[in-house]
Image (spheres, helix red, strand yellow):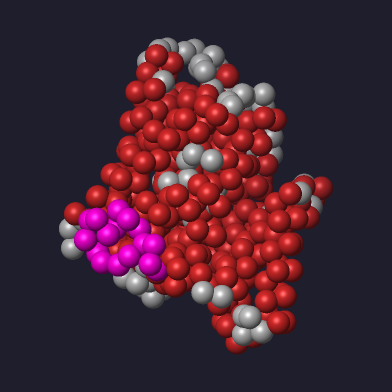
Amino acid sequence: MRTALVGLVLLVVGAAAVVSGVLPGAEALVLANRVWPILLFVVAITVVTELAAEAGVFRYLAERAADWGRGRTIVLWLLVVVFATASTVFLSLDTTAVLLTPVVVVLARHVGVNPLPFALTTVWLANTASLLLPVSNLTNLLAEHALGSAGPAAFVALTWLPALVAVLVPSALLLVIYRRALFGRYEPEHPQPVEDRVLFAWSAAVLVLLVPALVSGLPVWLPASVAAVVLAAVFLARRPRLLTASLVPWSLVLLASGLFLAMESAHALGLGDLLARLVGDGDDAGALLRMAGVAALGANAVDNLPAYLALEPAAGSPDRVVALLIGVNAGPLITPWASLATLLWHQRLTRMDVRISWGRYALLGLLAAPLTVLAATLALAVRPG
């Protein structure tokens, strides 16, 4: 509710800027044409993943992981790292935070191990693993436009090495911090039967087909929308009571729309010039670290989306855009509001009675965020080609 209220307030502020002439109507229209495909993708992918979760796809994967772990906690945790990374890369960070978090908590409890390192793995990787593809993060979809919309392959060519480092560094830190909990054994439980095999089969098939479609070069809103319509039709026939308005992430859409409009208005008032002086210029390692560091500080101060929007005009080159993404994607591990995915993650944990104070979360983030941003930015600076 607070998220929706903040979004509504920002929309009112942005609308006032348009009406008063601070933000020219032509520029607002250009912004709308840039934003609607992104918001449509967010809605569609959320509907797909929520329905797939209702069909039991994610729970099935978790139970298979318990079997594949063969009673060794470290193997089970490594499988969670793989699942969290894949979920973030192909289905977005919010999917990992919202849907995978309860799955791994239930999984940890079923096998009798501490759920906290598994839960932290999901939220850290939901953020840091979101560098590889345009669909991984809302900021990446914005950056794809700034990079010239050259497609997923060109995006991966720029981000693959920092993306790999941004997965390995926080994973290694978690392994060190929770080594006692992760090096042990467990007894796997019997998996639960699938409740509706038809829904499960359709949902699994849609996800399998959607993943390559999202990296095919098509506008990502198109395959995501088709997948959402197909699954909605199947659920309408099998379990219509689950098709409610709550499937649509209204709060997120309102917040994102408000942020887009408010930040565009702020740039019209001269914010861009101020930030350009702050981040400097150049593509050498020092300049890239400066951009990534400012971006990470901005994300932890005001949230990663407005931080990206504020700094994008000061990027100016592909490497600087990627450095900006490293800061706003891998950096928001300290404050609760640095990433919407973090707030959604904590909400899910609270509902499942898994406790971690924001103080402890921030202390761990103060260790992980600087190291991850530093290592990923240096990887960008030395990337071949």
- Give residue 31's position: percent from left, percent from top: 57, 77
Quadrant where the image shows the C terminus: bottom left
Residue 282, picture quadrant: bottom left
Residue appearing at x 62%, y 68% in the figure: 262
Residue toward you, 214 or 149: 149
- Give residue 169's position: percent from left, percent from top: 33, 37
Q: Which residues are magenta?
A: 276-291
Residue appearing at x 52%, y 18% in the figure: 114
The vertical placement of 208 against 217, above or below, is above
Whether residue 92 is visible to the viewer of this picture, yes or no, is: no
The vertical placement of 13 against 337, above or below, is below
- Give residue 366's position: percent from left, percent from top: 43, 35
Residue appearing at x 71%, y 82% in the figure: 20
The vertical placement of 282 against 99, above or below, is below
Residue appearing at x 81%, y 48% in the figure: 241
- Give residue 302's position: percent from left, percent from top: 56, 52
